Amino acid sequence: MTEVTIYHNPRCSKSRQTLQLLQEHGFEPQVIEYMKQHFEADAIKTLLNQLGFVSARELMRSKEDEFKALNLATENDEDKLIQAMIEHPRLIERPIVVVGDQARLGRPPEAVLELVQ
C-alpha cells in the first residue's frame, strides 16, 4: 500500500475534509499535526520542492494576522520566509499531502487524489 502523509491542522475544515477523503479512498495516512510538531527549515524546503513551488511565499497564508504583523508581503529573502513559517506555523498553507517524492495542497481536498490514484 502507498505510504501517505498529511500535514494536518484539525481546526481547519479543508484539512479535516482532505483527511476524510483519503480515508474514504482506503488510505490511513501518517498524520502530522504541524501546529504541535513544528517544521525544521530542511523539511519546509523539501516540501517546497515536492509541491513544485518556486518560492516559500507560495506556501504562506497571506491573510493571517502574523503575515501582516511580520511585514512579510515585501520580504523576498527565502530563508527569512521559511524562518517565519517555523516560528509561526499558522502561516503554512494546509493541508499538505505527501506521497513518495510528490506533494499537493488539499485546496480543494480532491487535488490530493492525483497522488494516490
Image (cartoon, grey):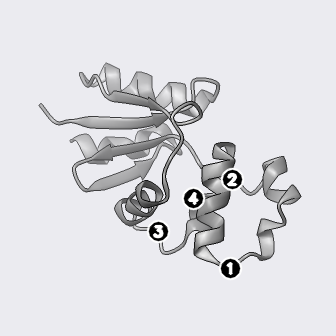
Of tags 4 and 1, the one toward the viewer is 1
- The amino acid pointed to by label 4 is Leu
Q: Which residue is mark 3?
A: 53
Q: Number of callouts in the render?
A: 4
Number of other residues with Cα within 10 Å of mark 3, as a class: few under 14, some 14 to 19, many 20 or more: few
Decide: marks 3, 4 in contact (CB < 8 A)? yes
Crowding at label 4, few (<14), some or many (≥20) Cα neighbours within 10 Å?
A: many
Residue at the extreme left: 1
User: Considering only vertical position in the picture, is 36 above or below 106?
Assistant: above
Q: CA distance from mark 3 to mark 2?
A: 14 Å
Instruction: Return the disc, 3 or 4, that comes first in the chain's sequence.
Output: 3
Q: Secondary structure at mark 3?
A: loop
Report which residue position mark 2 lands on.
Answer: 61
Q: Amino acid at mark 3?
A: Phe
Spatial CA distance of label 4 from label 2 is 7 Å
Give the secondary structure at mark 1.
loop
Disc 4 secondary structure class = helix
Picture quadrant of residue 99 = top left
For residue 117, side relative to residue 12 (left or right): left
